Amino acid sequence: MSIKKETGVCNFYDPRDNVTHHMCDAELSNCVVLFSKYGWLLVSRGTRSMFFYEPFTKEKIELPDMPRDFSFNGICFSGLPPNYTIFGVWHVFAEWLAIVHLDISTGIWDWEVCDNDFLFLPSWSNPVFLNETFYCLGQDGSLGIYELREAGYTWKILDKPEPLCFPSAVGRNFLVSIEEELLSVFVGNLGEWVKVFKLRVADSEWVEVKNLGSQMLFVSPTTSLAVVASEEKMKNKFIFPSSATLMAKTCFILWKLVDIRPLRLTTLVEISMI
């Protein structure tokens, strides 16, 4: 989903059917969508104000203001409002990471600046909540985790998986959950190549995926998800929004991932001008 800040016009893209729906909502003017899941949007207005919004029912849940200005690499929430925890990570400087969370039971933002001894660089995409843990993907394929425990919360950088090597510089990367598993998606600069990996739990290693089968992946800085394709032609596809626009419309680029040259960006199947 994207919003035109000045007008509040919302564009909802449905990757399953490759269709975009439009809605005008003045409540979202001058706002930015940070994350979306379960039909809810996590929205910011300014640099300290944040709220939940359900765009179809118009239900709004105000959140406490942040204690300071924020600029997250990624942020997400664990479950449906009103039962949720919000987690965000921000690479402040090379040596520091800001770890932020809001527990609804307390209604207080917890903000901790951690020493970044491992030089963990979070990707500019949202974390994934899985099995009571927030997973945060590093730009090199490493993982940071934020665990929810009765005794408190813990943040740590995992020894495994080890960083990945790529044929050239990574332009974007994303983390996706699919059937209780984690997938990482890496896109080369200017879409030169695409690689997808699955986390093998037994030894905590990234294993390259050569075919998505009936699944299709949609990835973006605010929402990444895997869905079962509704049509044969949409199976084994990978979709993400391009930074390019044409006539003030968003471009969505769709590629097919083929087995012959595993997950190389081989065929530009379609460009949808939304």
Image (cartoon, rainbow, N blue to C red):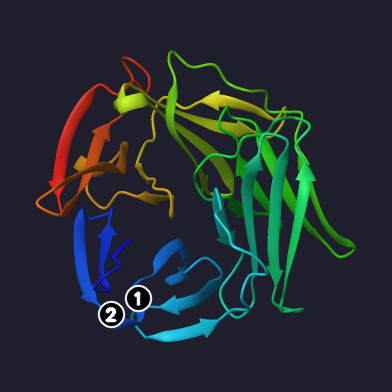
Alpha carbon separation for disc pair 2 and 1 = 6 Å
- Can you say whether 142 is above or below 156 in the image? above
- Can you say whether 10 is above or below 149 in the image? below
Residue shown at 63% from the left, 23% from the top: 163
Residue closest to the eye, 47 or 245:
47
Instruction: Inspect this view and state whether residue 232 appears.
Output: no
- Where is residue 172, by image quadrant? top left
Q: Are marks 2 and 1 in contact (CB under 8 Å)?
A: yes
How far from the left and from the top, in percent, is residue 66? 63, 70
Residue closest to the eye, 205 or 212:
205
- Can you say whether 102 is above or below 241 in the image? below
The quadrant in which the N terminus is found is: bottom left
Label drawn at residue 28: 1
Residue shown at 67% from the left, 34% from the top: 94
**Residue receiving disc 2:** 25
Instruction: Inspect this view and state whether residue 103 appears.
Output: yes
Amino acid identity at mark 2: Asp
How far from the left and from the top, in percent, is residue 60? 47, 84
Amino acid identity at mark 1: Leu
Residue shown at 70% from the left, 30% from the top: 119
Say which element carries label 2.
loop
